[in-house]
Image (cartoon, rainbow, N blue to C red):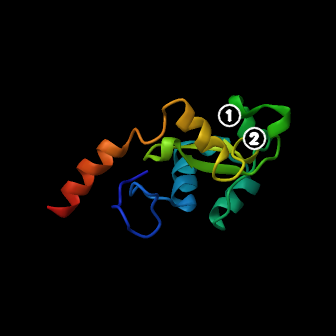
Amino acid sequence: MPYVGKGKPDTNSEGWLRDNSYYWNELLKNHPQAFNQSNIDKINLGFSPKNNPTFRSYFTQFDVDDLYNNTLIHHHVGGGGQADTVPSGLHPGSDGIHNAEKAIGAWGNDSTYAELLEKFLKE
């Protein structure tokens, strides 16, 4: 996700853009074959798509019975700028996956980049 700046609207705590529509439109643009018309309609209306058969046929890592038809969430890995798709069943609230990332040392690793980018924005 693009760096916008700390404290700016629609950003996470490090200043990276937090925008579902941006994320899903980028994924749709780069991987159109992963989305059926129902999920395209959801994205165009500003909603998150579902882990349906078309999506699972392209992103086979989500072809897990317990994740079928979960709403897909755009997740900032480690609270940073890299975002990825996570089915809602694997992202229970704001603590679940984030606590696991903190436990393995994957939290806050983009803060150095955010600090550098913040300096560029101020100059």
Q: Residue at x 51, y 58 (%)?
A: 22
Q: Residue at x 68, y 34 (%)?
A: 58
Residue 59 falls left or right of residue 66: left
* Marks 2 and 1 in Cβ contact (< 8 Å): yes
| Mark 2 residue crowding within 10 angstroms, few (<14) / some (14–19) / many (20+) | some
Residue 61 falls left or right of residue 112: right
Q: Which residue is mark 2?
A: 54
Residue 41 falls left or right of residue 122: right
In this view, the residue in front, 109 or 38, is 109
Please state which amino acid type lies under the numbered disc 1: Tyr
Residue 116 falls left or right of residue 67: left
Q: Residue at x 72, y 41 (%)?
A: 90
In the rendered image, residue 104, in percent from the top left (x then y), is placed at: 54, 29
Q: In the rendered view, would you say 35 is above or below 15?
A: above
Please state which amino acid type lies under the numbered disc 2: Thr
Q: Residue furthest right?
A: 65
In the rendered image, which quarter is residue 86 located in? top right
Q: Which quadrant, please, contains the C terminus? A: bottom left
In this view, the residue in front, 39 or 8, is 8
In the rendered image, residue 29, in percent from the top left (x then y), is placed at: 53, 49
Q: In the rendered view, would you say 84 is above or below 48?
A: above
Under tag 2, what secondary structure?
Answer: helix
Q: Residue at x 78, y 47 (%)?
A: 70
Q: Which mark is residue 11?
A: none
Distance of label 2 from label 1 (alpha carbons): 7 Å
Q: In the rendered view, would you say 3 is above or below 31?
A: below
| Mark 1 residue crowding within 10 angstroms, few (<14) / some (14–19) / many (20+) | some
Q: Which residue is mark 1?
A: 58
